[in-house]
Amino acid sequence: MIKKSVFIIALFFSFSVFAQKMNVLFIAVDDLKPLLGCYGISEIKSPNIDRLAKSGTVFLNNHCQQAVCSPSRASLMFGLRPDKTKVWDLKTPVRTATKNDKTVAQQFKENGYEAVAFGKIFHISMADKGHDSKSWSISYSKVNVSNYPKETGEPFGGHFQNPVLKEKMTEFYEKQISEGKKPGKARGNTLAKMKVSTEMLDVSDEAYGDGQIANNAVEMIDQLANKEKPFFIAVGFKKPHLPFVAPKKYWDLYNRDKIELANWQKKPEGAPDFAMHSWGELKSYSDIKPNILPSGILNDTKQRELIHGYMAAVSYTDAQIGKLLDELEKQGVADNTIIVLWGDHGWHLGDHGIWCKHSNFEQATHSPLIFSAPGTKAGNKNSSPTEFVDIFPTLCDLAEIGTPDNLDGVSLKPILTGEKTKVKDFAISQYPRGPRMGYSLRNERYRYTAWFEIDYRKGEKATSENLIAEELYDYKTDYDETVNHADEKSYKKIKKDLAGKLMGFLKN
């Protein structure tokens, strides 16, 4: 009788341990700002992301570490700020300063998880051919395959399905090949000359890359669900990144005539010129420069087309995310899976007269972050400051696998469970401008940005001696950042407090 009781206890213990090994679905969305229903934007159609939000926590005041793809993703994946990863641009390989550091996926892989990635998790060209081979237990190249519909074939350059445009691009590409250009160079030259910012065609979801990514990820969930080893499946969708291409049915969700343009399309009064940028990423598209007015902003027609395209691309990607959520439910593992969804940074849609990311303004750093996990609160919305370096420790904490001691973030689990409403006082973003680095502190109400003239690549530290400009924005009175309050007497005490906190942070 005693032996039988011991056996039952041991069996129960083994099942309990197995049950504690929760799966992870790690969803990245390229250039996704918090333009979502769950963030209070009723005009946007994002039913699947909103469904995820209802099952977990939406972080309303979350910020990226640097508002451009590769630095943001490297920082998030390693749990380290850009000044530690040394990735501040789109040219530096992600393992430059982190050869001995672990990514969050690698941490899970080394703790018994099947780790696999689809689409864009790192900036594609800045990782090795295996998309950072150390991070994955299943080959990236073997699972990222394409099966485009016969009626459309593969999109040119990974983006365009318009048959007329594809024919012109193909002719130009083949001409360059005949002249001795290498395929990569010929493709790049073709896109540089002919790419357009939007495309609306009556095609299936699978005609574009994100539909392929979703199908591959669904198949992997089917393969790995309910196996002895838990999974860490990372799925990186590429829209709403430019160009804004999506099947027509997603464009049809919106009335372009009713789209509102940004209220403030000028530089903030009193802000330094280098806080701005010339949105060269968008200007690289062939249909943009002809639509720029003498004032330097886009005409209203083109603005509405771009915003319409962005919204359509968001809804298209939302539908692909729905396929993943549906598959978790189909396989019966939804209740045993931690889900985190993030967009790598925000995106300017004409505010301040600029587009794309690449700034320390709210529309660039403010990024969506949603967690849903077993044992946490559902339908929770939290407005305390959080940031992307917090994702790594939070996932480890939720999965109970142990957290590396070198990470820059903190676990958000106390917020997810309802134990706390706040785990930090501010979030820190940064952005370089030539020989300058701007560090931006965001709390519940204010943003304080300090610009330093330093050789950050050589490790020169920001100090009061090399401070060259300051910005201060009050989102309670001026959400559009129309005025820099840094030199106003009425904000003197607030600026001193925030500046002290930022300098204290930078000394550590």
Image: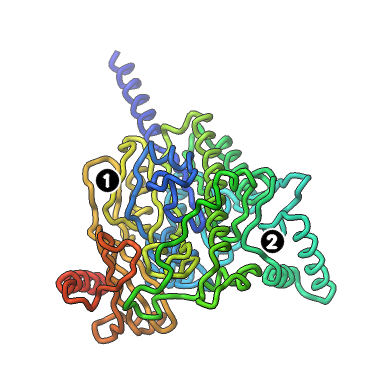
Q: Which quadrant of the view contains residue 451?
A: bottom left
Q: Nearer the viewer, residue 327 or 151?
A: 151
Instruction: From the image, tell me which residue sits under label 1.
Output: 415
**Above or below, 98 relative to 459:** above
Q: Residue at x 46, y 64 (%)?
A: 348
Q: Nearer the viewer, residue 60 or 184?
A: 60
Q: Nearer the viewer, residue 228 or 326?
A: 326
- Would residue 158 appear left or right of 218 to someone viewing this image? right
Q: Residues within 10 Å of mark 2 (few under 14, many from 20)?
A: some
Q: Nearer the viewer, residue 224 or 276?
A: 276
Q: Residue at x 33, y 75 (%)?
A: 269
Give how far across and how far down residue 138 sits, in percent: 57, 48
**Above or below, 119 relative to 47:** below
Give how far across and how far down residue 102 sits, in percent: 43, 59
Give how far across and how far down residue 256 sits, in percent: 55, 52
Work out which residue is located at the far front of the displayed protein and give it: 257
**Element assignment for label 1:** helix
Q: Can residue 378 be seen at all in this image of the molecule?
A: yes
Work out which residue is located at the far left of the displayed protein and give it: 493
Query: Could you tell me how far apart the alpha carbons at marks 1 and 2 are, in whole angstroms?
Result: 42 Å
Quarter of the picture containing the C terminus is bottom left
> Given the image, on which type of amino acid does mark 2 rest?
Gly
Instruction: From the image, tell me which residue sits under label 2.
Output: 157
Give how far across and how far down residue 436 sits, in percent: 38, 81
> Given the image, on which type of amino acid does mark 1 rest?
Ile
Q: Residue at x 34, y 58 (%)?
A: 387
**Above or below, 320 relative to 461:** above
